[in-house]
Image (cartoon, grey):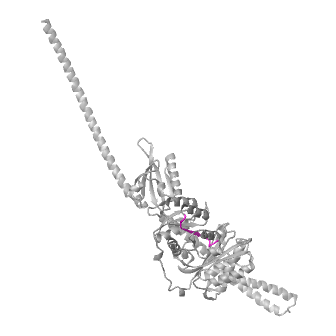
Amino acid sequence: MARQKKSAADLIDKVQKLEKEVQAYKIALKRAESVSSDLQSQLNREKECNEQLVHNEQKYRQIIESIQEGYFETDLKGRINFVNQALIQISGYEREELIGAEFHDFTPPRTARAITSAFGKVFKTGQDAKVRNYEVFHKSGHTLIIEFSATLIRDQNGIAVGFRGILRDVSSQVKDAEKEKHMQTQIQQAQKMEALGTLAGGLAHGFNNVLMAIQGNLSIMRMNFPADDDLRRHLERINHSTEKGARLAKEILSFAKVGKFVVMATDLNKILKSTSRMFTRSNTRLKIHEIYEQKLWQTQVDRVQIGQVLLSLYMNAAEAMTDGGDLYLQSENIYLDESYTKPFNNKPGRYVKISVTDSGKGLGGEAKRRIFEPFFSPYRPIRYEGLGLAAAYGTIKSHQGMINVYSEKGHGTTFNIYLPASEKELESLPDGAEADRGDETVLIVEDDPVASRMGRDILERWGYRVMVTDNGGEAIEIYSEYQKRIQLVLLDAILPDLSGDQVFFSLRKIDPGVLVIVTSGYNVNQQIAYLLNHGCTDFIQKPFQSRALSSKVRAALDRKAVPSNLSVLYPG
């Protein structure tokens, strides 16, 4: 019986233990159900968050794709990993060509350095950086001017993982601003000279009235004295001075563009030859080089006045070359478009161009701005006799022509005169515009932004693809990398880092058959002649004119451009 009681007690204990375990399992199950419910809620929340993130990502991408500015993202090494459609359109490259590439694959070295510097600044400081007015290559070969801003990309832990930025094509704005600035400068100069001319004209008329009274009374007084009388000799000296004053008044009237002219059809080559022979008789220390257009268009000019203008330019050159030097005279037929003639208030069309270049001291900025002012001389404190180049300026303006100066300190000076060609001779002249078009790639090496933009605009208008750099070192790097794409180089003879000679011969080492047209604001001089005699294809003077530049480039690419008779004038 005792055993039965013990067994029953053990059984009860087991049952009670089982009940406790069951109760514990129930509690654990409820807890598990609660945890499962919490996990499911969390999973649902995470799913909703992920869906929201995907939605936000899609919305973000749609916004990025819809903006007109180019958008890009890169890793810390500058490799592109995302671009929007606008950047694809701006650059001309496909998305697959851009992804994985680096910025310097599409830029000249100067822009690559600027972008690398900007990214470095962003990484170090965490602040935004901007790069303005830098050049990149479009896929077609022409150059774009861009600006972009870059910011740092950080992950969720705040660690920098890359860069993002907005890029804009500002080529047209930059070109328009530079054209406007250049035109305004020319207009202001023309207005200043116009105002000076008006003032000078009024003074000259008053001066003439005074001289007439003096000369009239002198002539009467001289009749009252015999030729050997001492007083008569004093009167002769006074009369001589008044005659000099009358000549000065005539020059002032020429500057004021109200002088009297005897206009007739003229071959300017004849005036160049006669005046240069006359000048060299008394200036034997100067060596004259003459390059004349054989079939020069005729002009309607006063031959005496134009001869005096040329003599004034020769005398100015002599003052710049006191120890002797070279004087280069050139004539050519040229077509000027409205972009060149508008600031001078002249009509576009065909002109005869006369260039007078010396190898003298050259002019600084202030001297160039004042060179046509009355009584100003860049080589002497004051011009005591005559208006000099001011009279030359007035004479050319009176003939509906234009005159300008190009010079750099230590590199000589070129004066260019443009006189309208006689329309009677030009009616049957062919236009020949379509023959100058092309689709080749041209590299312009030019440190003057106005000249480089003008050259690029002209060539792109005629269908060419254009690359641009502003120094010789980059030109050599670009040609070394892209020589298979570049068919011709337009090379400025004077660059800030290397000479035109150095760049040319470096290009010849890369490609012995490289085609190079040398350019300069000067007329043909010794350096240009040296380059032409050593393999440069041709020469063109700045500022560029559309028809002249396109025809020179087309001729060079067709292997038709042969330097004139420079090898005879300047033996190499």
Q: Nearer the viewer, residue 141 or 37?
A: 141
- Where in the figure is residue 365, as x and y percent of width and height? 65, 67
Highlighted range, magenta: 512-525
**Is 98 left or right of 291, judged from the image as shown?**
left
In this view, which residue lies farthest toward the top?
2
Where does the C terminus fall, quadrant-wise? bottom right
Q: Nearer the viewer, residue 497 or 516?
A: 516
> Which secondary structure type mostly characterizes the magenta part of the structure?
loop
Kindly indicate the quadrant of the structure image that contains residue 222. Answer: bottom right
Q: Is residue 4 among what the camera can see?
A: yes
- Where in the figure is residue 401, as x and y percent of width and height? 59, 80
Q: Residue at x 50, y 84 (%)?
A: 429
**Is 383 left or right of 115, judged from the image as shown?**
right
Q: Is residue 148 in the magenta section?
A: no
Q: Nearer the viewer, residue 444 or 118?
A: 444
Where does the N terminus fall, quadrant-wise? top left
**Is 19 left or right of 467, judged from the image as shown?**
left
Up the image or down, 194 lies above or below 209; here it is above
Q: Is residue 253 among what the camera can see?
A: no
- Where in the figure is residue 254, as x and y percent of width and height? 66, 82
Q: Is residue 519 in the magenta section?
A: yes
Q: Nearer the viewer, residue 410 or 509?
A: 509
Up the image or down, 224 lies above or below 566; here it is below
- Where in the figure is residue 42, as x and y percent of width and height? 29, 38
In this view, which residue lies farthest toward the left?
1
In this view, which residue lies farthest toward the front?
512
Up the image or down, 294 lies above or below 87; here it is below
Kindly indicate the quadrant of the structure image that contains residue 206. Answer: bottom right
Q: Residue at x 47, y 54 (%)?
A: 103
| Count of numbered marks | 0
Kindly indicate the quadrant of the structure image that contains residue 154. Answer: top left
